[in-house]
Image (cartoon, rainbow, N blue to C red):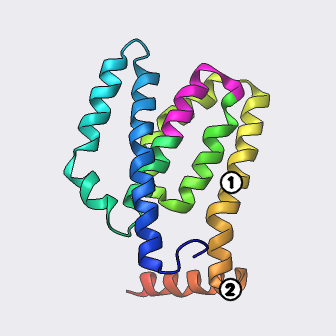
Amino acid sequence: RLFVHDDVAALTGISVLASIAALALVYGVVRELFPESRRLALATTIVYAFLPPVWFYAGIPITDTAGAAAALLVLWLALKAMKNSRLLPAPFAAFGFACGVRPQSLLVAIVPLAIALWRSGARARLLAAATGFAAILAFWLGPVIWAAGGLAPLAASFRERFHYVVSS
């Protein structure tokens, strides 16, 4: 609401921007996987750009496009970190951010993140873990606690749902 005062327009704008970012990220992911093939990256990006879901979801205010762009960002950064462990905190920071956007979209990035973590040294792993934890707190858990009105109401809500599921 800082720039656009209508909620639907603001969320639609985020969807449009995320769709545009996803195009660049698809190109980047393919270039990381096949660095010798610029044509393949370009062709993949063009095909992605014309997929019907990309067109459909880009113009509606839902988190699908933002989740896809966030997952592609994590994937691209993880692929870069697989080659250079100094970059390892970046995909973990992006992972924390993406958890706040659409956590289920991140499944595609789990394996590359694990490989990048496995290939790195202990210091890089510790820094990546700390970065990821801080980002998850800032972008996922923090906003959940704030929206719930604090830890006590959040815990009460969890207990209520647990008892509902167990007693059903």
Query: Between 7 and 167, which is closer to the camera in this rendering?
Result: 7
Mark linked to residue 135: 1
Q: Is residue 90 left or right of residue 107?
A: right
Sequence-wise first label, 1 or 2: 1
User: Looking at the rendering, in which quadrant would you find the N terminus?
Assistant: bottom right
SS for callout 2: loop
User: Looking at the rendering, in which quadrant would you find the C terminus?
Assistant: bottom left
* Neighbour tally class for label 1: few under 14, some 14-19, many 20 plus, Cα within 10 Å: many
Residue 109: give x, y in percent of width and height. 47, 40
**Residue that sits furthest to the top in the current view:** 36
Query: Between 110 and 158, which is closer to the camera in this rendering?
Result: 110
The residue lying at 51 percent from left, 61 percent from top is 101
Taking the magenta stretch, the answer to whether it contains residue 80 is yes
Mark linked to residue 149: 2
Residue 75: give x, y in percent of width and height. 49, 37
Q: Is residue 149 left or right of residue 108?
A: right
- Above or below, comparing residue 94 to residue 1 in the picture: above
Q: Amino acid at mark 1?
A: Ala
The residue lying at 42 percent from left, 64 percent from top is 63
Query: Between 124 and 80, which is closer to the camera in this rendering?
Result: 80
Magenta stretch: helix, strand or loop mostly: helix
Residue stretch in magenta: 74-86
- Above or below, comparing residue 87 to residue 69 in the picture: above
* Neighbour tally class for label 2: few under 14, some 14-19, many 20 plus, Cα within 10 Å: few
Residue 6: give x, y in percent of width and height. 47, 81
